[in-house]
Amino acid sequence: MDSTTYRNWRVLCWNVRGLNSDARQRDVRAKIEESQCSIVCLQETKMALICSSVVLDTLGAEFDDYSYLPAHGMRGGILHGRAGT
C-alpha cells in the first residue's frame, strides 16, 4: 500500500470533570498543544451549551471541525474536535 494514504493520528481523551472555568479551559488547551493531537474527545464537560468561543479558547483555531452533546444538569456532556487537514 502507498504510505501516503496513512495519517499518524494522535488522540487525546480526557474526563475533564467540568469545562466551565477559564482556568480549566486553559489547562485543556495547554495539554492539547503539548500532545500535538489531531483528535480531542472531552467527557463530562458539564456544559449544556458550548459556543464557538469556548471551542476556540479550549481547543484552538486548528480544531475547526467539532461537535458536542450537551450535559443534563451537572451531569455529562461531550466535546469532540478534529484538527483540519
Image (tube, rainbow, N blue to C red):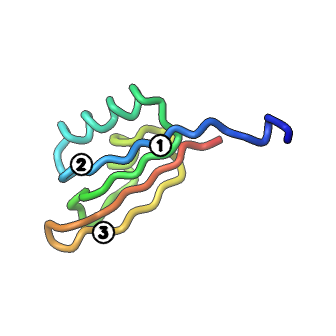
Q: CA distance from mark 1 to mark 2?
A: 15 Å
Looking at the rendered structure, the kind of residue marked 1 is Val
Q: Residue at x 47, y 30 (%)?
A: 36
Q: Name the image quarter holding the C terminus.
A: top right
Q: Residue at x 60, y 43 (%)?
A: 84
**Residue 44: % across, % down:** 24, 58
Disc number lying in front (2 or 3)? 2
Q: CA distance from mark 1 to mark 3?
A: 21 Å
Task: Kindly identify which residue carries mark 3.
Answer: 70
Secondary element at image label 2: loop
Along the line of sight, the residue nearer the viewer: 2 or 35: 2
Along the line of sight, the residue nearer the viewer: 12 or 70: 12
Task: Kindly identify which residue carries mark 2.
Answer: 16
Asked whether, in this view, residue 65 is left or right of residue 40, the answer is right
Asked whether, in this view, residue 55 is left or right of residue 44, the answer is right
Name the disc covering residue 58, or none.
none
Q: Who comes first in sequence, dot 1 or dot 3?
A: 1
Along the line of sight, the residue nearer the viewer: 76 or 47: 76
Looking at the rendered structure, the kind of residue marked 2 is Val
Q: CA distance from mark 2 to mark 3?
A: 14 Å
Looking at the rendered structure, the kind of residue marked 3 is Pro
**Residue 47: % across, % down:** 23, 61
Q: Residue at x 43, y 55 (%)?
A: 80
Where on the picture, by quarter, is residue 35?
A: top left
Disc number lying in front (1 or 2)? 1
Residue at the extreme bottom: 72
Q: Residue at x 15, y 72 (%)?
A: 73
Residue at the extreme left: 74
Is the residue under label 2 in contact with that under label 1 (CB below 8 Å)? no
Task: Kindly identify which residue carries mark 1.
Answer: 11
Residue at the extreme top: 34
Secondary element at image label 3: loop
